[in-house]
Amino acid sequence: MGELREKPNTYRAGPDEGGHFGIYGGRFAAETLMPLILDLERHYEAAKRDPAFAAEIARLATHYVGRPSPLYFAPRLTAHFGGAKIYLKRDELNHTGSHKINNCIGQILLARRMGKIRIIAETGAGQHGVAAATVAALFNLPCRVYMGAVDVERQKPNVFRMKLLGAEVVPVTSGSRTLKDALNEALRDWVTNVADTFYIIGTVAGPHPYPTMVRDFQSVIGREAREQILAAEGRLPDAVVACIGGGSNAMGLFHPFLDDEGVRIIGVEAAGHGIETGRHAASLTAGSPGVLHGNRTYLLQDDDGQIAEAHSISAGLDYPGVGPEHAWLRDVGRAEYVAIRDDEALAAFTLCARLEGIIPALEPAHALAYVAKLAPHMAADQIIVMNLCGRGDKDIFTVADALGDRL
Amino acid sequence: MSTRRIERRFATLRAQGRKGLVTFVTAGDPDLATSRAILAGLPAAGADLIELGMPFTDPMADGPPVQAASLRAIRAGANMRRTLELVRDFRADDADTPIILMGYYNPIYVYGSARFLVDAGAAGVDGLIVVDLPPEEDAELCQPALSAGFSFVRLATPTTLGERLPRVLGSASGFVYYVSITGITGARTPEVADVAAAVARLRRHTDLPIAVGFGIKTAVQARAIAEIGDAVVVGSALVSVIAALDGAERGDVVGSVLALVRELAAGVRAAGGWS
């Protein structure tokens, strides 16, 4: 698919000045937002050079979020699959229950540096919404979270958590009433309230600098995992695996490993009812390049460039696009992208609970379902590191429903 | 050449001592035949320039009325090829009224930018407004469009200030579209004093005509804004008429839209002339 290119010296140099990863990324934003986006970029560049900014993130990561998260060797999953050693990066143990808080800490500190006094966010599964509501509470800023009406229904526990944290949750009834439409509504709010509002985007998408900024805030996952596996095994893993909706947990795990040639990098998309049914969320597996939500990337769309509705049992993966850096990594061949169906993810969900006593979110259950396919074909001395990026409490109603149980 | 159609129209307006009405409707809304009839009737009803929306599922900078118009059109089978057919049909009977295609980049990108410029030129399109192509992405479409003879109409907004103004206006052509509020289409109505200050600011940086849009719904508002700008853009109010008449006879839909255009045109024409 991708054009042939010479292999770069490093896969970690992107993006260019305009926010491009190859042909992907960029700043496809309305003029009203452009001055803000440029201002955000300036502030982010300044913050990156300020040791006090890094120190404040580190302080909160340690004492508020609970980092570093453990890298846990999963003995029973390893034995069950009968192949490679399985290590789980336990980002579900973070405060708020997912990796999303890593990014929200960084962005709220940036919002304060910029003097913004109001926070907005979009959310799919509600994990990012909860994380945004959490940091807004911590820093005493009003927070409004846009959430597709379909997702409000299927992620009720997180809706209530956001309300407990003082956020206003706005159900979005336009379009497919899921994450894509929540993003549209958040952008409409931002374009209306440009003077005082900071938009905390939850994934590695949106106009530059968001994909880079969110990746940087999430890369703590991969940096820790790299150190931890070196400490535990004395060597790098053979594969790192993470689920992909927009792709922030995956980008955070992958980025520090991009230049480690021996490490396979595998992103797992949601195949929903199956790629062949058309009811899925696998934009890298079955989509095509297009421009949406501020960046060029792979999209689920028809021949006329109209955006298709995504389908996944997991609200967090239910998005018809993906972060632009993933699109580039796919085209240059550094990362592999595969897809896992709803039923496969459900099986992995219950397997993880019964074998390791860990109830994963449905999102990383997709990653685990692919590990289940990969590990048996690997040797016992090989290593897989998988990002267990969220816990599954929020999903129990969805899973009970899918399994025919009544809660 | 096509660019001249926009310039000629503004020159004519200036010569006649009146301001212009720019009407926005979405191509194929609520269906192709009705849309064709609305377009054909717009010039006689008082539209001086026509903005034709290219339907898109996710118009992030537009409010509910324009998004609903896009979704109606898509459901009724609208696509880029048919949008350009509507322009060609219109052009067969009207050689003078400028048509500016307005929308988002993805349908153009997927159609193929080069092929799009060829086909749009052949259909009789004069200018383009692409909401999510700021100057930072000029290489995508703006530069090839200008080379191909199209006007690339820039959106200037209340946040387009200082050193950004020359950047935005530098490659502008045809006219400048001043977005009168920070917000989405069809939302709140702009304050006349704010618009006056902003238009004065723009005039220090450009000699192009300035059209003002966003939030203008009535003839009274149109008149007030026409006192300031060189043209007034009305869109959401027109597509809302189509929405309200969902399921009505084609003739009623066309008649109601054109009746509102006549009212708005009367408002614009009651405003003072060019300074």
Image: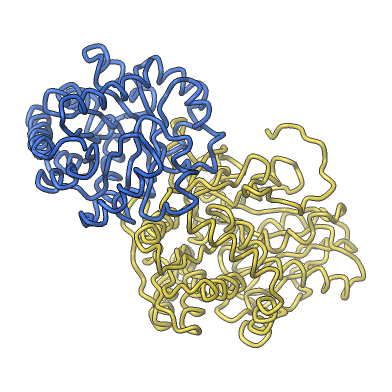
Please report the residue visible at 24 percent of the width from the left and 34 percent of the height from the top: B25
Q: Quadrant of the N terminus of chain A?
A: top right
Along the line of sight, the residue nearer the viewer: B252 or A88: B252
Q: Residue A87's x, y, as percent?
A: 77, 69
Considering every residue shown, the one lying at the far bottom of the view is A63
| Residue A368 seen | no
Q: Residue A144's x, y, as percent?
A: 39, 71
Q: Does B227 sit left or right of A28 as displayed?
A: left
Apparent colour of chain B:
blue
Apparent colour of chain A:
yellow
User: Quadrant of the rendered structure where residue A226 is?
Assistant: bottom right
Please report the residue visible at 32 percent of the width from the left and 48 percent of the height from the top: B179
Considering every residue shown, the one lying at the far right of the view is A234
User: Quadrant of the rendered structure where residue B132 is?
Assistant: top left
Q: Is residue A100 above or below residue B271?
A: below
Q: Residue B249's x, y, as percent?
A: 8, 30
Please report the residue visible at 74 percent of the width from the left and 69 percent of the height from the top: A77
Q: Quadrant of the C terminus of chain A?
A: bottom left
Q: Residue A18's x, y, as percent?
A: 62, 47
Q: Does A240 sit left or right of B182 as displayed?
A: right
Along the line of sight, the residue nearer the viewer: A89 or A405: A89
Q: Is residue A172 above or below residue B241?
A: below
Q: Is residue B6 above or below residue A301?
A: above
| Residue B214 seen | yes
Q: Does B180 sit left or right of A340 as displayed?
A: left
